[in-house]
Amino acid sequence: MSTFQRENDAAKSLFRRLESAVTPIVSGEYSHHHHHRDRTAMASRVSFTQIRLEAEMERYRAECQWDKMLAVIEQMHAARIHEDDDYGMLMMAESLLEDCLQENMDLLRRSSPLMEKTQPKLCRAKGYLNTILSQGRLAPRYLNEALLLMAKVHYVQGRYRDAQGMCARVGLEELTLDEQPTYHLRLLAEAFVIKGLSLDHQTVSAVSRVRLSEREEESLSCFLRACDAALSYLQELDKVVTTPHVKAAKSSPLMSAVDIDLGYFLQAALQSAYLCLLHRGHLAQGAHQLRRVLRVVESRGSQSFRKAAARKLAEVLLSSVSEDSYWPPLGPPPSAWLHREGAAASKDAIYPTVKPPQRYSTDCCFCPQDVVEEAVLLLLITESMASGDAVISRLPDQADARQASLQDATSVYDLLTIGMARRGQYAMLSECLERAMKFSFNEFHLWHQLGLSLMAARKGVGAVSVFKECARMRPEDPSLPLLAAKICISQLHWFDEAEALSQTVVSMGEEAGEFLPRAFLAVGLCCSLQASDASLKADRDEFNKRALQALKKAHSLDPQDAHIAMYLALQLALIRQVSAAMEPLQAALSLCGDDLQSLHLLTLLLSAQKHHRHALDTLNLALSQHPDNFNLLFTKVKLEEAMFGPAAALQTCEEMLQRWQSRYDVSRSSETDDSSSIPMAERTEVSQGARKPSIHLTLPDFQDASTGSLSPSTVAVSRLEAALSEVSDISSSRRQGPTYIWTTLEHIWLQAGELFMSDSRLKEAQFCIAEASAIFPSSHSVLLQRGRLAELRGQLDEAKGLYDEALAIHPTGERILVHMGRLLVKSGRVHLGEKVLRDAVQVHSISHEAWSSLGEALQSRDSSQAPDCFLTALELEASCPIRPFTVIPREL
């Protein structure tokens, strides 16, 4: 019972306060005209109506619903409320003025003054305000509001000194009292920002530099206070809108769904502080202010502002803050930054706020550790907001909104591209850009960015589809089909598709401009790769002929392109026109003397001419510029074996193992921080293995050109081997990183094993082959070497079984076919061996080993064709390089 009594007393007390507050206003003059009525009853009845209407008016003013204020004003007029003052006129002036400002946002953003003759609402509002201020019939609270509205009028008309004077007359202490209505916080923010903007717009004579500095500091203090007041207003408004009074909720069920439309001055109040600091070159203080506002507790009305602030902070971090000068988000700017900006402390510490907003607690929160991490996290949050707010409607009346939201999102994705590219996170970037496709119909820029990110992430199929769509949008751009062709050649090995794409650029003719030679180069590379992949000699010759024609055309169109000249020389070398290949290669080296592939090709050409000493000198020159290139080192091993024997070549193999260890598996005892955003590629975290080296890396998955290019016919084989090895290798979970790293290590071990077999050191060879087998147990190269080792030990049945397994994985392998054929001939199965060797000659018509082995098989049964085979083998061996010319990567 006592609880009910207390609540009843509180209700009565509130009623008496409300009645005393409004009764004198409405009951004084009214009684002279109606003295026959009961004054007390009438006053109390009118007071309740007035309370309801004024509360509704305050709510509309807080929510910036200016159009709804007119109906309340009419109700007040009908109920004869505020007849003896200018309250209704003040509300009418505010409604007209705010409507006018909302209609002219673009002019306000350009700081273009509004003219009374072209703005009737502004003219009427100014007339009402002049009347109010000249009559002075309002209470001080409402006179303050009238002064602020007049300051707005002066500002939008370009009379900044008058606006500043009006702001000086506003009693700000009235707006900062406790238990003030919510809209007073909005008025407080607007008062500060109008004063700050007015100070900024006023000119100062050149001699008054001290006065200019003082004015800049004063305007900045206004902006900082305006920002905090605006954020506090949005937080308070959120409480009122999302938790309305029960009766109010019943009368207005849609109240919680009010869409807050921030006007020009509220937006300026939120943004002017950090924009002012950044405009003056105070990057550290500007970034600090942006971090401060982003730590404010989020409200429904501040979402668009937070999105803009997060994007701006990410832009500042990516463009102006280096890795070394970064400071944590929760700390103040470094003193060195502040000293450069001429400040002793951050501005928020110098100018305490009048209405601080609520901020999130920093206890147990995640804190970025470097500049890129903070920027990317900000952008990922912004991207989720931007993609969610994007306008996807294609209706004509939504065109402007759709374009604005698209520009907003595009700026975020551009910054994301910069940030994620620094960390090599192309897969994540492509996922973000894929989310943008729902509102990017026919938007070339975003589609192009998506294609590039998919290409960098080695998602070739998707990248080709995207570039085809880009080419549909811009059929006149020749670079787009060539990008798709590049992916088809280097990643997917879709040579027919790549040739068709390149032919579309060739068909453009001179309109393709500088891309026309590149298009012919692409056609030539496609034909050359198809020739290497062809199983029939007629097809191979046709592809080689077309490749040579296309490359000669490309070279004639652009003789200054070193890559085209090099690939022309390579094509001539592939068809064993070694002397003819020297001329375009010399042209390529004269244009680019340190080109890796050109020097490597020159080495192979010299070795084909049996100038091994000059070849080794050229190779050492190339290695001096590219010491970590394993493709060059493998060629060096072969040259040293031919010149100095297996022992010297084995020393180079040992150096290659050490180089691989230092490059991909550097042993370090220091522990790394798992929470760091720096990718594992840069940290090179290592754990010691029992026998086999092991690394734990997350590297950008780019194909390393230094390992050479896989023969087209072995691409599917390599994928099959990798899949089989993943199943059979128990320790595969310890092997991380791109496959080419481990393929290189496998090749080093197998090369060493081959050298040991040449030196008749079978035990060491077995150890090397076992090491290679531990990496890829199902590799056809490993099975071939195991078969050769078994054959050298006289275990012919085991050798044949291993060769059969290797052929099952790689049916067209030259060395597998040759060794299998020789083994069959040696074991007495001459006819079967001859058939296998004939298959080898058909697929590898320029292999002197295959022709020589076939001659031996034919000779064993006294065939008259044997001498022809031996002559062909001698002729081919005369132009055979130390390693196949196909080890030179053929990429666009």
Image (cartoon, grey):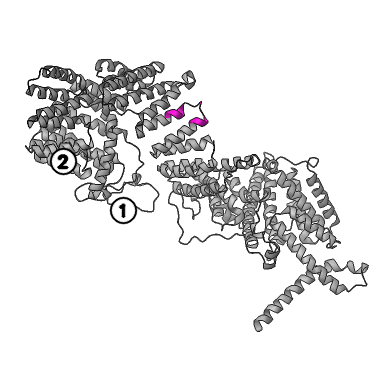
Question: Picture coordinates of residue 324 (x, y %)?
Answer: 42, 46
Q: Residue at x 12, y 33 (%)?
A: 647
Residue 136: in sight, yes or no? Answer: yes
Residue hosting label 2: 768
Was residue 553 drawn as part of the magenta stretch in this picture?
A: no
Question: Picture coordinates of residue 565 (x, y %)?
Answer: 34, 20
Question: Picture coordinates of residue 611 (x, y %)?
Answer: 19, 20
Residue 559: in sight, yes or no? Answer: no
Query: Observer-nearest residue: 324 or 79?
Result: 79
Query: Observer-nearest residue: 764 or 201?
Result: 764
Was residue 474 drawn as part of the magenta stretch in this picture?
A: yes
Magenta residue span: 471-482
Q: Is 377 rendered above or below residue 251?
A: above
Q: Using residue 483 as the reference point, say whether residue 820 is left or right of it.
A: left
Tag 2: amino acid: Cys
Q: Residue at x 19, y 43 (%)?
A: 773
Q: Tell me the number on the disc at residue 671.
A: 1
